[in-house]
Amino acid sequence: MKRPLPLYRTLAASLRADITSGKFKPGDSFPTEMEICEIHSVSRHTAREALRILTDDGLIERRRGAGTVVVGERVAAFAQSINDFDSLLQYARDAHFQVTERCDAGSEILDRYGLTGDFIILEGIRRELDKPPQASVSILVRRDLAPDLADGAILEGSISERIEQQHGIPIARVTQRMEAVALDPKSAARLDLDPGTPALSAIRRFRDGSDEVILLSISLYPAGRFAYEMQLERR
Amino acid sequence: MKRPLPLYRTLAASLRADITSGKFKPGDSFPTEMEICEIHSVSRHTAREALRILTDDGLIERRRGAGTVVVGERVAAFAQSINDFDSLLQYARDAHFQVTERCDAGSEILDRYGLTGDFIILEGIRRELDKPPQASVSILVRRDLAPDLADGAILEGSISERIEQQHGIPIARVTQRMEAVALDPKSAARLDLDPGTPALSAIRRFRDGSDEVILLSISLYPAGRFAYEMQLERR
DNA sequence: CACAGCGAAATGTCCGGACAAATGAAGCGA
DNA sequence: TCGCTTCATTTGTCCGGACATTTCGCTGTG
């Protein structure tokens, strides 16, 4: 039933694992294109597509004539990532997610977020105890992983951790995209605000070990109720 | 002299111009790969590289079997992937800062951002080559570190790196705070938008080794022109 | 030892071809 | 009309090759 991943994507996942497993450490030189071609029996084009993914992800750096190196000395920056990852989950743990609607994800929605498969949508609000609603949230989750709950149910804690525990699927990476948007009428009503109110849109894609998106959340934090802070340390 | 741009880059610029000039409007279908090949006399590979640039910039969307369409203005955003210290600086390097105003920082402003000392304010816009203004920026910098430039000057590259090099003060840490706001009239005018338009506010504090703030920047990225992407790796 | 020059190696650019997969429209039949 | 199939179109994937450009180590010369 599953469509097989393209070769260059599985290759990228394999090379990514070589880095995260510690086979190649930050600062190490990475195999050359030709070496990858021979080792994995692929064309140079395929190898380059895979390397491009790692480059875009900031895992490696490439210089013409010089070669490829694993991005070096990112101890501090990576510590930052750990902090972020944990604090992201910590925040999710502290807040409650109140479901107001549950429906299937149409192809249009799936298309918009680049998802493939059978997903359902959970809509609702996220709030901390005794506080006004903090965000309007839409969650797209694969049907076989979705929690079994009815409209109006209140879900405590982090959905991603729930999935990890109940289905044994570890989340390997989260990519996050933030931008400013105007509140749509539906979300505005949920948060008791006027449509058009500025809001911070955070789209998070939770990925498993093979880089497949298994959960996608769209959070709308209205102006004044939420700020995202982060620190970047120089190495 | 300037090194000549690769063919796929000039082609991308040409295609980008076709969109920004209005030759192709949002929602229009875009020439197919083969049409571009014939019109510009390039190989399909080169055409695809150019189209990939426009796709990464969010100017077009492509669907297998269906074709290529210019995306609606609403959705068009220039995603910036920033997941560590280096890429934050890299982003600053690629963009130009155009100064529109220079004045002293009053005590009220300094108080608001918790600064002490003698600061001046540089206001202006930040943009990348061939792209519309991306952000309205206010920079508070210590007077003795401020670059010597007049109104209307264009500053290339990163201001923080400039300070590091010219004054030998290394930046040790950057803290960043992001939230949604409504555009104030002044910034709105600079970006040619209506006041009240949603925007992403990013306040960055650049600190030296002793944790003193030596530069503070307030960037307002209007909705639809900028998205902030980051990756969190589990370790 | 310093240095210029050379050349191997590595990535970047560009071309060609082939097949796969998805789309959408046209045609066909019940 | 509605539904189904067929088919050309379009983008995605993968392969092969060629040359350009940059880097870096080696080597010979002074």
Image (cartoon, coloured by chain):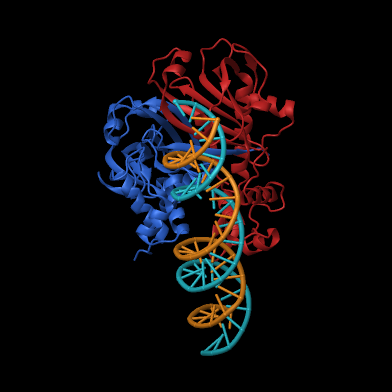
Chain colours: A red, B blue, C orange, D cyan
Query: Which residue, as the protein is rendered here, is positioned at the far left?
Result: B151
- Given residues B42 and A170, the one toward you in this image is B42
B120 vs A184: above or below = below
Q: Can residue B183 be seen here?
A: yes
The percent position of residue A72, horizontal first and vertical second, equals 61, 52
Q: Residue at x 54, y 32 (%)?
A: A110
Q: Can residue B207 be seen here?
A: no
- Given residues B136 and A120, the one toward you in this image is A120
User: Which image quadrant: the N terminus of chain B?
Assistant: bottom left
The percent position of residue B94, horizontal first and vertical second, equals 41, 49
The percent position of residue A139, horizontal first and vertical second, equals 57, 25
Q: Residue at x 67, y 34 (%)?
A: A171
User: Which image quadrant: the C terminus of chain B?
Assistant: top right
> Tag count in the figure?
0
Left or right side of A164 for A54: left
- Given residues B142 and A93, the one toward you in this image is A93
The percent position of residue C25, horizontal first and vertical second, equals 42, 40
Q: Please tell me in which quadrant of the rendered image residue A158 appears.
A: top right
A155 vs A65: above or below = above
Q: Please tell me in which quadrant of the rendered image residue B134 appears.
A: top left
